[in-house]
Image: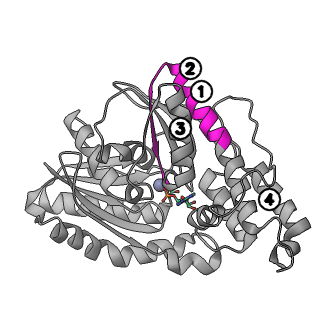
Amino acid sequence: MNVLGIETSCDETACSVVRNGNVVRSNIISSSLALHARHGGIIPEIAFRAQLETITPVAEQALSQGKVRLDDIGLLAVTKGPGLLGSLLVGVSFAKAVALSRKIPLIGVNHLHAHMYSPFLTARRELPFISLVISGGHTSLYKVPASGEPALLGETLDDACGEAFDKVAKILGLGFPGGPAIEKAALSGDPEAIRFPRSNTRNEFDFSFSGIKTAVLYYWQKHGRKHTSRKHGKKTVADICASFQRAAFQPVIDKALAACARSRIRALAVGGGVAANGDLRSRLTVSAKKFGIQTLFPEKKYCTDNAAMVAGLAFHLFKEGMRSDLKLGTDLDERS
Ligand code: KG4
Ligand code: ZN
């Protein structure tokens, strides 16, 4: 069965045709990121205006590149939340209109559950597994059982990990989004050069990133000028990026593995924009191997927001009997 996935929860307008949960026939993403860059963050009004303009052409392109017509689509899948209200409404309204006019079944998908599914667009899905969703909006650990809803084990108490990368990049003048820029700069830096604090939380599976971000800010205010001076050859911006990355990821690695140990589950699936980071991928994989835990990452193009993960998950939900009706609304609560 061909599923047309629609994802408009943040800055992207994305549509994808996926057959039987894992054969990605097209994956079209149009981003308004460039329009937000000078503001240093996403402006909701700019995002949804762009989505209103792009949703129809992006859907048409997904169909034509997937070599299917609307008549070949057996299911419409749309992100219902969490996300930006105006943006979500564009996708949900569009999906409902197509469902109504073409009599195609419809499923509203939780954006986080879609990220959790993303590694399985290219790998066999075996349940149960522990899921780490690490993105610009979320940093959460879930236990995904053999049947039923994912159970939240812990989440960030303040900034999301990707958000901390974005804020640190802004402090250092590296542009937006910050994750890829920090990863690139960190490649030539020393992760041991500066010891930024590792986060500490009361619940062992919760996260906190605001302390590390503030430590970078204070460090930069105190030593920043030296880093921009050509004469200062020792600690560079690259060292700050590498040290920040090390401090941000160490608790993530430790807590994800602890969640596997506590649940006696030997599969750890990672999803979300930060899962594209090569340092996180390699260090988590090496550490997990020592405990006999298998790590599963999405292909890099399926880490950041995309509609293939929405269509892929919806195929399985449909098989389990789930359907949405035309009363489908947006869901701003993460846990729904
Ligand atoms: O999943 P996503 O596209 O959107 C949300 O649902 O939040 O994630 C975007 C986030 C941004 O904060 C971005 O800086 C971060 O993912 N990101 C990265 C990398 N690529 C994207 N963070 C660290 N390293 C990367 N390579
Ligand atoms: Zn996302």
Residue 336 position in % (x across, y down): 46, 40
Residue 1 in percent (x, y) is at: 13, 48
Looking at the picture, which amino acid does disc 4 mark?
Val
> What's the residue at 32%, 43% (across, down)?
120
Foreground mark, 1 or 3, reads 3
Label at residue 117? none
Q: Secondary structure at mark 2?
A: helix
Q: Residue at x 75, y 68 (%)?
A: 237
Majority SS type along the magenta span: helix
Amino acid found under the numbered disc labelled 1 = Ala
- Gap in angstroms between the C-alphas marked 3 and 4: 27 Å
Question: Residue 286 bears which disc, if any?
Answer: 3
Q: Is residue 194 left or right of residue 96?
A: right
Q: Quadrant of residue 144?
A: top left
Query: Please, is residue 120 above or below residue 68 in the view?
Result: above
Q: Secondary structure at mark 3?
A: helix
Find out whether the residues at labels 1 and 2 contact each other: C-beta distance under 8 Å: yes
The structure residue drawn at horizontal position 21% and vertical position 72%, both measured from the top left corner, is 60
In reply to whether residue 264 is colored magenta, the answer given is: yes
The residue type indicated by label 3 comes to Val
User: Going from the N terminus, do you reach mark 4 or mark 2 first?
Assistant: 4
Residue interval drawn in magenta: 250-274
Provide the residue designation for mark 2.
262
- Give the SS element for disc 1: helix
> Going from the N terminus, do you reach mark 3 or mark 4 first?
4
**CA separation, marks 2 and 3?**
19 Å
Q: Which residue is mark 1?
A: 258
Q: Residue placed at 76% from the left, 50% from the top?
A: 192
